[in-house]
Image: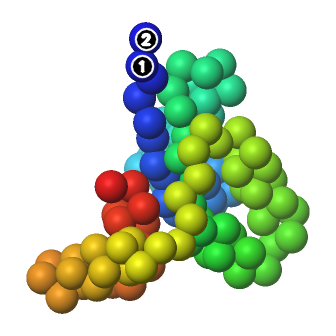
Amino acid sequence: MKLWRLYLDNCCFNRPYDDQSSLPVYLETQAKLNIQEQVKNHEVELVWSFILTAENEANPDYDIRDKIADWMDLSANYVPYSPNIEIYAANLMEQNGVDAKDALHVACAV
């Protein structure tokens, strides 16, 4: 059986470390924790990318950064930088007004 591949942006990985007093943040965290369990149980495949690594390495909180970096080891697929991804992202930015990092995440997911 082929498993679903999931690509999560850096906000998803950081959500469990955010203030949980807001209901939307709490619910998003619960969804992320559920996905984490599915990844650990090999029910879905996690996709990691060069832009996730770059964004995570910029996190000034070393503890959180290290915990998030561990997810790269659990990923089934890694998307490295390529000129095609850059072109796809540039088109998203130009045609849809998507910001650069979000465009790179979408391009990596695609």
Q: Amino acid at mark 2?
A: Met
Tag of residue 1 = 2
Q: Which residue occupies 65% across, 19% down?
A: 41
> Which numbered tag is attached to residue 89?
none
**Which residue is at the far bottom?**
94
Above or below, 23 relative to 97: above
Assign the N terminus to one quadrant of the image.
top left
Q: How is the image coloured?
A: rainbow
Left or right for 49, reference 82: right
Would you place residue 110 above or below residue 32 in this image? below
Q: Residue at x 57, y 45 (%)?
A: 77
| Vertical placement of residue 47 versus 82, above or below | above
Structural crowding at the residue carrying mark 1, measured as other residues with C-alpha within 10 Å and reported as few (<14), some (14–19) or many (≥20): few
| Dot 2: element | loop
Nearest the eye: 91 or 44: 91
Callouts 1 and 2 close, C-beta under 8 Å: yes
Relative image position of residue 10 (x, y in whole percent): 55, 63
Residue 14: image x %, image y %? 62, 59
